[in-house]
Image (cartoon, rainbow, N blue to C red):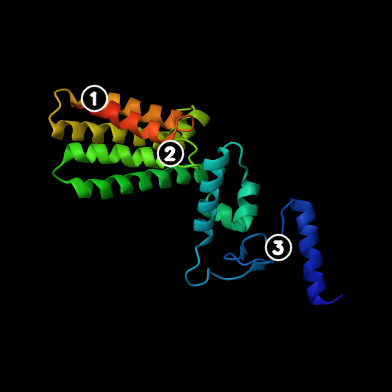
Amino acid sequence: MSFSNLVQTCLYLYTLQTGLYYCQMDNDQNLEPGGASPRRGPPRKGEPSARERILATASKLFYRDGIRAVGIDTVLAESGVAKASLYRAFPSKDALITAFVTEHDQAFWARWDALAAQYVDEPRAFLKAFLISLAERISRPDFRGCPFLNVSTEFPDDAYDARRVARANKDKLRSRLAETCSRIGIADPDRTAGQLLLLINGAYVTAQMASDAELSRSLTDAAERLVE
């Protein structure tokens, strides 16, 4: 028996005894998208990393199909990333879910800040523009609800990390709305902010049942009455 065959035999016997799976794979090895043959080495120039591909795929699937309905194997198949790469980036599905919600939170506030920069000294105009932009987003055909409300519904345990991120987003939104209402000159900005948040969350829930024009008009009209 050659030395190479002897090594392979020893590895095979070790696998049988320990239950561990052995494969000759570099730590940075990835699968090509679509389940093609694996390739070795870091991502090509301009190509997203394994972590980015996993998160992008999981975000799409979680939002479209529901978090509990999507298994890790589905994420692997869609992203074309090796399982070892997935667990290096995200030790558990819970960690992946938290990253998904965190990414949505960061995107939400990036949109808020970009819009606020256009209305630095016009809080009332900013609030109206924010509500119009929100109505436009939730009127899109691919809208599947507010990701923060979705997570809170699927995971009711307050100790769950992803739920805490979702809750923090809503708390921060109420605080930002209160600041805006205060700048407008509303007598009770905290109470009005709570009413606006209730209105916004209600719009998220009813978005898939109302026409685009009806939703946008109802949302902005109701909000304007609150801040008169």
For label 2, the residue is 139
Residue hosting label 1:
225
Residue 225 is situated, as x and y percent measured from the top left of the image, at 23, 25
Q: Report x, y in % for residue 41.
A: 57, 71
Q: Earlier in the sequence, mark 2 or mark 1?
A: 2
Element type at marker 2? Answer: loop
Residue depicted at 45% across the width and 38% down the height: 147
119 displayed left or right of 137: left
* Label number found at residue 42: none
Residue 155, visible in the rendered structure: no
Quarter of the image for the C terminus: give it: top left
Foreground: disc 1 or disc 3: 1
Disc 1, SS: helix
At label 1, the amino acid type is: Arg
User: Circle 3 sits on which residue?
Assistant: 23
Q: Residue at x 65, y 59 (%)?
A: 34
